[in-house]
Amino acid sequence: QDLHFHGGFDLGLPINFQLTVEDGVEKTVAIKRVLFWAQRLVGFGADGKVVPQKENVAPTIPGLLTFPDRTPDTWAPVEPVVPLDAGQPSHVALGKSLWIEPQKAKDAMGMDLDAEEYVTTVIDRDPPHLAVPDVVPHERLRYAFYTTAGHFDPARTVNELPPGVKGIIHLESRYVPPATLDDVPLDASTNLHLVTVWIVVRDDRGGETWVERKLALDPAP
């Protein structure tokens, strides 16, 4: 392994890129953060095999599932569990709620495609405190939930529990509609009170993608 004294590019040099687009009415700003190393890293996994440094692949959300509630003892979804597809909004009545669960990308063997193994650098605790390669077995995936009306509870979920905590991982979040339809205009093409929701997934190395869906709000029953 190559060892370097801390002080150069050994921990990765963060570089921010910003792209601004204006059309005279609206302005869109995109910011991307990358880490630069002066040379390619090489680490060793728990099995002793060489783990080369590879470019990050952004995580994805291949689909969304919805269900009306969770059981109080196990938090298992209550039927019906149905997909939330693009172009086909799910209906939510005021005073009710809807759970939305992002799906994870899997390979043919059922393995998680997005929680990638990767190589980074850390400072060795022992003197002379060199920067040494470190292999992270898998990335954490963090999900953020946004909407144009109402709110999500919780607003963030993650694909693994904190160290030492045992339990079942839940990626879903509960969409809670606003109290009234006063600030949710009717969509001209569907004559429905539509709200937009976005679910964003991020990994440890700055990879990020999102999906956008519509929900139709109905008056309280």
Image (cartoon, rainbow, N blue to C red):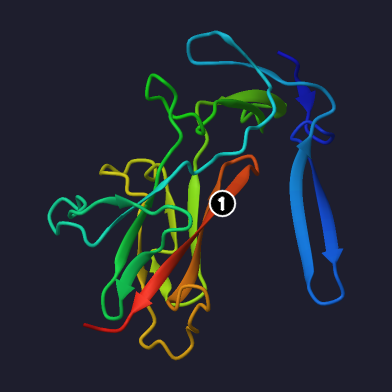
Residue 76, horizontal then vertical, whole percent: 19, 50
Residue 131, horizontal then vertical, whole percent: 72, 28
Q: Is residue 211 above or below residue 39?
A: below
Q: Which residue is mark 1?
A: 210
Identify which residue, 31 or 22, lies in the foreground.
22
Left or right of 5 in this view: 97: left
Q: Residue at x 63, y 42 (%)?
A: 207
Left or right of 155 in this view: 41: right
Quadrant including the N terminus: top right
Residue 187, horizontal then vertical, whole percent: 50, 77
Quadrant of the rendered image containing residue 4: top right
Q: Is residue 178 above or below residue 213?
A: below
Identify which residue, 45 or 170, lies in the foreground.
170
Quadrant of the rendered image containing residue 3: top right
Instruction: Mark 1: give few (<14), some (14-19) or many (20+) Cα within 10 Å.
Output: some
Helix, strand or loop at mark 1 = strand
Quadrant of the rendered image containing residue 71: bottom left
Q: Residue at x 56, y 51 (%)?
A: 210
Left or right of 112 in this view: 38: right
Identify which residue, 150 or 45, lies in the foreground.
150
Q: Is residue 182 above or below residue 72?
A: below
Quadrant including the C terminus: bottom left
Q: Is residue 48 above or below residue 88?
A: above
Residue 133, horizontal then vertical, whole percent: 66, 23
Left or right of 50 in this view: 41: right
